[in-house]
């Protein structure tokens, strides 16, 4: 199948493209950077400038499915300018794809778009399923709600649509695990806040395998991409410290200190989402990494 990937050069996109290629798929991708354009037989890059509504229409030639991952990184200071970039980059890209598909003949039948479990309201008691209506109203939740609304519009074009709400994706080189391990490996690990926040983690290999699974089975609707064993932050840090053979002896860092240091971004470490993986399991997907200690062992020993 020929697949158009947006955000193909990013953390998830690059691993996903490698998996898709190894499964015999052909990839077109759009990038905002001319330097990232490659032109090999099965992996072809095209330029787009979503903020100017510009896209190279050749990117759609023969494409049957789209995987939409593009968006400005959230790992930056949340200044008003960056917050606008984080939101607008996601809306611009989705809108440009929508308008392009609406106004041009194409063969696209299926689309998967990214979102995040940050859409759910922070809670230490509630278990979140895809149909939960208790959505947050902080910055990330607001971005996710608008982003999902935009992406669900592909249904109006008769395109089968799936939304994947990513949990805390575990990788040694990126994201939350990378940041926490930097501190824990120096022996300075400590719970952030009261440590009771739920961390709905998923090994990055399960993330890309699930996207492939959804793609080949053309599943529609919203899916939580989290593993089956959610843990509290204290449990997470304890297992991480054990894996890195470091102590976790410091007292908790109180929430107010984190809020003072990180401002609104403190939500990234203080918010709590206990999210269910049941729906994805019911589609027949068998998680490779069910337990956190096994996932950490795999990441640090390979
Ligand atoms: N990683 C996670 O733990 C996680 C969790 C929840 C949600 N997500 C979401 O999943 C998506 C993929 O995540 P990721 O970690 O792979 O992200 P990433 O590494 O930051 O990559 C995102 C890609 O988006 C493109 N991009 C950046 N700014 C853009 C802009 N202004 N306009 C158009 N494209 C732009 C870039 O591609 P080019 O440079 O080639 O244009 C970049 O490679 C992101 O939207 C992210 O918010 C990720």
Image: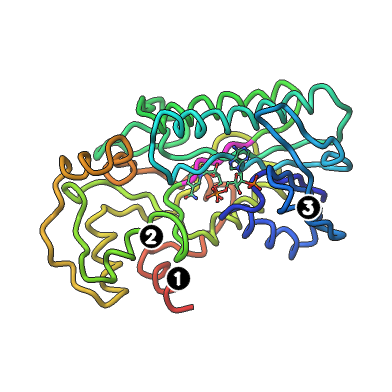
Q: Residue, x 23% and y 74% (percent of image)?
A: 246
Question: Looking at this view, is 101 or 65 the one in front?
Answer: 101
Is residue 130 shown above or below 195? above
Segment tinted magenta in the rendering: 162-166
How far is disc 1 from disc 2 in space, using C-alphas? Answer: 10 Å
Q: Residues within 10 Å of mark 1 (few under 14, many from 20)?
A: some
Q: Which element is circle 3 on? A: strand
Is residue 236 shown above or below 99? below
Q: Residues within 10 Å of mark 3 (few under 14, many from 20)?
A: many
Q: Which mark is residue 299?
A: 1
Residue 13 belongs to magenta span: no
Question: Looking at this view, is 19 or 124 the one in front?
Answer: 19
Disc 1 + disc 2, Cβ < 8 Å? yes
Q: Quadrant of ligand 1?
A: top right
Residue under pointer 2? 177
Q: Which element is circle 1 on? A: helix
First in sequence: mark 1 vs mark 2:
2
Q: Residue, x 38% and y 41% (percent of image)?
A: 77
First in sequence: mark 2 vs mark 3:
3
Residue 124, position in %: x, y? 24, 40
């Amino acid at each position: 199948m020929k697949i158009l990937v947006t955000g193909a050069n990013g953390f998830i996109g690059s691993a996903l493209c490698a998996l898709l290629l190894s499964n015999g798929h052909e990839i077109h991708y759009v990038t905002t950077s001319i330097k990232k354009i490659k032109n090999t037989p099965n992996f072809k890059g095209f330029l787009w400038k979503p903020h100017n509504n510009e896209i190279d229409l050749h990117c759609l030639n023969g494409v049957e499915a789209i995987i939409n991952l593009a968006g400005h990184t959230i790992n930056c200071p949340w200044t008003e300018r960056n917050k606008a970039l984080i939101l607008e980059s996601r809306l611009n890209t989705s809108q440009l794809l929508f308008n392009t598909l609406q106004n041009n003949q194409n063969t696209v039948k299926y689309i998967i778009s990214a979102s995040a479990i940050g859409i759910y309201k922070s809670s230490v008691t509630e278990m979140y399923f895809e149909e939960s209506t208790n959505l947050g109203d902080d910055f990330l939740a607001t971005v996710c709600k608008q982003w999902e609304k935009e992406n669900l519009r592909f249904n109006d074009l008769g395109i089968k649509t799936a939304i994947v709400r990513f949990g805390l994706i575990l990788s040694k080189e990126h994201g939350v695990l990378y940041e926490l391990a930097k501190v824990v490996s120096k022996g300075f690990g400590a719970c952030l806040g009261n440590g009771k926040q739920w961390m709905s983690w998923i090994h990055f290999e399960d993330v890309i395998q699930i996207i492939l699974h959804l793609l080949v089975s053309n599943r529609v609707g919203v899916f939580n991409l989290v593993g089956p064993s959610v843990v509290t932050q204290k449990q997470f840090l304890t297992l991480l410290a054990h894996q890195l053979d470091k102590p976790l002896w410091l007292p908790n860092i109180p929430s107010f200190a984190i809020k003072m240091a990180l401002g609104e971004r403190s939500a990234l470490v203080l918010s709590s989402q206990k999210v269910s993986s049941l729906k994805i399991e019911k589609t027949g997907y068998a998680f490779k990494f069910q337990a956190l200690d096994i996932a950490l062992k795999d990441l640090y020993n390979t």
